[in-house]
Amino acid sequence: MLSSLILGAASTVLVAQGTANRTVIPKTCFDSVADFENSFGYLYPWGSDHNGAARMDKDHIKISGGVLNLTASPVAGQMPASSGGKSIDIHYLSGTVYAKAHFNVSRTGGYDFMGDFRATTTRGTWPAFWLTAVKGWPPEIDMAEWKGSGDISFNTFNTSSEVAAKDVNYPKPEDFHSIKAELRGLNGKDVQVKFYLDGELVTTQVGKDFFGVPMYLIIDLQMEGSSGSPGPSGDTNYEVKNLEVLISNT
Ligand SMILES: *[C@@H]1O[C@H](CO)[C@@H](O)[C@H](O)[C@H]1NC(C)=O
Ligand SMILES: *[C@@H]1O[C@H](CO)[C@@H](O)[C@H](O)[C@H]1NC(C)=O
Ligand SMILES: *[C@@H]1O[C@H](CO)[C@@H](O)[C@H](O)[C@H]1NC(C)=O
Ligand SMILES: *[C@@H]1O[C@H](CO)[C@@H](O)[C@H](O)[C@H]1NC(C)=O
């Protein structure tokens, strides 16, 4: 009698955990600058430069009416960037933001990352929506990356040479498209990622030893680099709305 009571209570708790679902970043995060600053910081977590020809600058980040709007504009006379021991000429000022929260898939649950994106596939434009290790590297999960080819790319890096990479045709870049990545712990070691475009599952990848490793969420409009060059001579916009991150107990 006593044991069945305890069992009953335990299974109730399990059911409650299985359906629980908590918001880490709310859909309202781009409604105002104050909402944005609750969840996000400006530029990369490490500063203004990374691995392309854009230097990030706060004035190229606009938040209004539920939309994050990053703009890359051509610029001259900047000091080169330095990345991975290489000097990279800066040809643009652009925008990048990162989530203040860190994300680690742990025993307490997986994550859903989702939003609607208007991204260009023009040569030399390199918008992305991605996760990268807070300390060291990998993990890296590219939940969406557009490398100026007409495709969208979904990638998971076990190492720099062991990479799951899926490129698919990206229709109508002038429209918003929905992106979703579901991250789930697999075996207490690895993390499975299901990548969706416009509600359709495109590919499933597995990140080796990603379990419990904290990652940054970054939304950036890099330029040139992996997207080819020269990039556009005018402004480029990258717009994101309905961004939301959920954590689950499943
Ligand atoms: C983003 O900014 C550009 C340039 O200011 C503007 O033309 C465009 O309409 C904006 N996009 C949205 C969705 O507000
Ligand atoms: C990962 O997340 C869990 C639960 O949110 C937390 O207890 C743990 O400390 C985190 N691990 C690291 C390495 O940050
Ligand atoms: C990465 O490692 C995971 C776990 O071992 C494995 O399932 C996956 O196939 C690996 N990815 C690649 C591209 O080899
Ligand atoms: C949140 O709940 C919905 C509806 O039950 C479910 O489809 C989704 O997978 C859950 N999200 C996470 C991160 O588990």
Image (spheres, rainbow, N blue to C red):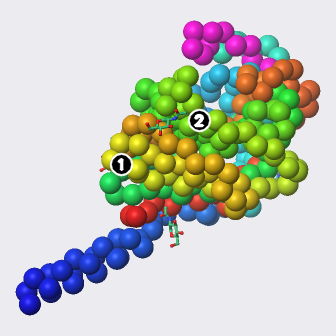
Q: Residues within 10 Å of mark 1 (few under 14, many from 20)?
A: few
- Residue at 54% x, 23% y: name it: 160
Q: Is residue 100 visible?
A: no
Q: Does ligand 3 reach within 8 Å of label 1's beta carbon? A: no
Res. 3 mark: none
Residue 25 percent coordinates (x, y): 53, 58
Q: Residue furthest right?
A: 233
Q: Is mark 2 within 8 Å of ligand 3?
A: yes
Which three-letter amino acid code belongs to the residue tagged 2? Ala
Give residue 187's mark: 1
Of pointers 2 and 1, the one earlier in the residue sequence:
2
x and y percent of residue 57 in the render? 69, 32
Asked whether 9 or 242 is in front, the reply is 9
Image position of 147 (left or right of 164): right
Residue 109: x %, y % from top left: 39, 58
Task: Please tell me the numbered disc located at residue 164.
Answer: 2
- Region rendered in magenta: 82-92
Q: How many marks?
A: 2
Residue 85 location, x and y as percent?
57, 9
Indicate whether 162 appears above or below 172: above
Q: CA distance from mark 2 to mark 1?
A: 19 Å
Q: Is residue 249 left or right of residue 76?
A: left
**Dot 1 amino acid type:** Asn
> In the image shown, does 11 or 240 lie closer to the viewer?
11
Residues marked 2 and 1 touching at CB (< 8 Å): no
Q: Is residue 196 visible?
A: yes
Quadrant in the rendering for residue 114: bottom right
Q: Quadrant of the N terminus?
A: bottom left
